[in-house]
């Protein structure tokens, strides 16, 4: 018998069929009712499927679960793939036992239980047990047993080409999940000054696609279409960088600054969102004196560019300007650096599947 190409390693087909039921019927309970099992059993399958695929498939909500875009796209592709699988086995019966089909196909392809077991990494007895499930379903023997082993019956061998092709059709659906980007929400200044310089190294290290959306406020965790968020906050999440306030400017302008009083003779740059930064720093560095005031920019990154160009002195956030300070494009001529109660923090907006792309990105950012 000529061997067909081996099908890809797939999650349990029964789990994939259950995913379709959950998406189409709107939740675990309705899917469980359609399959004659408990909602808890459906939940266990979906968690196992998330772990196998490395992506989140459902968001928890007040009214149950909501499928992620990845789950909806996968379910849409699974419907014709499962229909094709059913057509391949139609000569043997309808509604086949999905969990037994991969061992059954391997036994057909290899012409026996022992060789199939070696290919699947299980025991020959386990393959034989699954083949018996298919035989019980079809109501006939599909392998002839004899002293030298087993041989597929002509009726069983006839379904192998279509069955193998049908199983091969699931591989592209699994591959598309790896292409889904990890979605990160971040403050505009954080996106431009902290995340953007790190993205090339992140992509090179992990081989993942990352999408960054700039938001002025942190998104609501339960409703937002993001995996991670990076914002300044006093509590919560994981600390990426502590922050401190310190005046920064181009090296040429720094020569004119010896004490805080010299700020009166140079242009002052501020950010509209963090308009209280100069006041917070002055309250510690020059108590009792009015805080410097100057030109306000709507984007902090634009104010940073102005400072680098020598246009004035900016109240710097050390968490965002560490690279500029290390490179010498900006310097901090006036101390002290006043610690901020808000650190740059990484928030997981939903439970992350272990070893998923989002989980790996989160871990990488914490060590970057």
Image (spheres, grey):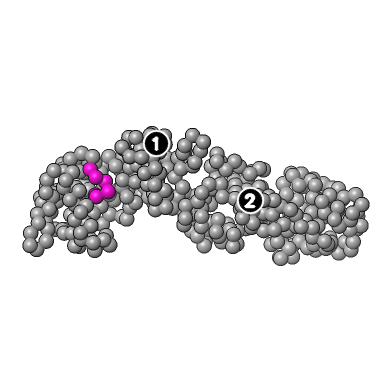
Residue visible at 15% across and 58% down?
Answer: 111
Left or right: residue 200 versus residue 146 is: right
Residue visible at 26% across and 61% down?
Answer: 122
Residue visible at 55% across and 39% down?
Answer: 223
Q: Which residue is mark 1?
A: 29
In the image, residue 127 lies in the stretch drawn in magenta:
no
Q: Secondary structure at mark 1?
A: helix
Which mark sits nearer the N-terminus, 2 or 1? 1
Can you give x and y, in whole percent of width and height, for residue 226 in the image? 55, 45
How many C-alpha atoms fall within 10 Å of the one at disc 2: few (<14), some, or many (≥20)?
A: few
Can you give x and y, in whole percent of width and height, for residue 201 in the image? 56, 61
Name the quadrant containing residue 202: bottom right
Image position of 147 with respect to 288: above or below: below
Would you say residue 55 is visible in this rendering? Answer: yes
Q: What span is in magenta?
A: 96-101
Q: Secondary structure at mark 2?
A: loop
Can you give x and y, in whole percent of width and height, for residue 243 in the image? 72, 57
Can you give x and y, in whole percent of width and height, for residue 121 in the image? 27, 62
Q: Which residue is mark 2?
A: 236
């Amino acid at each position: 018998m000529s061997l067909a190409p081996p099908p890809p390693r797939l999650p349990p087909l029964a789990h994939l069929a259950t995913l379709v039921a959950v998406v189409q019927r709107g939740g675990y309970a309705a899917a469980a009712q359609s399959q004659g099992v408990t909602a808890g059993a459906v939940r266990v399958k979906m968690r196992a499927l998330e772990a196998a695929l490395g992506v989140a498939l459902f968001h928890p909500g007040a009214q149950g679960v909501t499928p992620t875009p990845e789950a909806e796209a996968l379910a849409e592709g699974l419907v014709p793939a499962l229909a094709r699988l059913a057509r391949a086995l139609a000569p043997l019966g309808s509604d086949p036992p999905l969990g037994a089909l991969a061992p059954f196909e391997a036994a057909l392809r290899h012409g026996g239980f022992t060789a199939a077991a070696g290919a699947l990494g299980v025991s020959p007895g386990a393959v034989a047990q699954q083949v018996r499930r298919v035989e019980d379903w079809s109501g006939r023997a599909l392998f002839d047993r004899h002293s030298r082993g087993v041989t597929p019956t002509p009726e069983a061998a006839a379904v192998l080409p279509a069955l193998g092709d049908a199983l091969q059709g699931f591989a592209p659906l699994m591959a598309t999940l790896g292409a889904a980007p990890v979605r990160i929400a971040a403050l505009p200044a954080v996106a431009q000054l902290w995340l953007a310089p790190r993205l090339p190294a992140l992509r090179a290290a992990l081989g993942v696609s990352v999408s960054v959306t700039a938001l002025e406020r942190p998104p609501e965790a339960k409703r937002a279409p993001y995996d991670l968020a990076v914002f300044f906050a006093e509590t919560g999440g994981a600390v990426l960088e502590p922050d401190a306030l310190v005046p920064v400017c181009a090296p040429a302008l720094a020569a004119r600054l010896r004490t805080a009083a010299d700020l009166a003779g140079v242009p002052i740059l501020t950010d509209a969102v963090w308009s209280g930064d100069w006041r917070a720093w002055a309250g510690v560095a020059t108590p009792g004196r009015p805080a410097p005031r100057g030109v306000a920019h709507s984007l902090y990154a634009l104010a940073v560019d102005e400072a680098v160009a020598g246009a004035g002195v900016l109240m710097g956030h050390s968490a965002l300007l560490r690279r500029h300070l290390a490179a010498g494009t900006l310097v901090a001529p006036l101390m002290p650096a006043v610690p901020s109660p808000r650190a740059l923090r990484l928030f997981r907006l939903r439970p992350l599947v272990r070893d998923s792309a989002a989980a790996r990105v989160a871990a990488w950012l914490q060590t970057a």
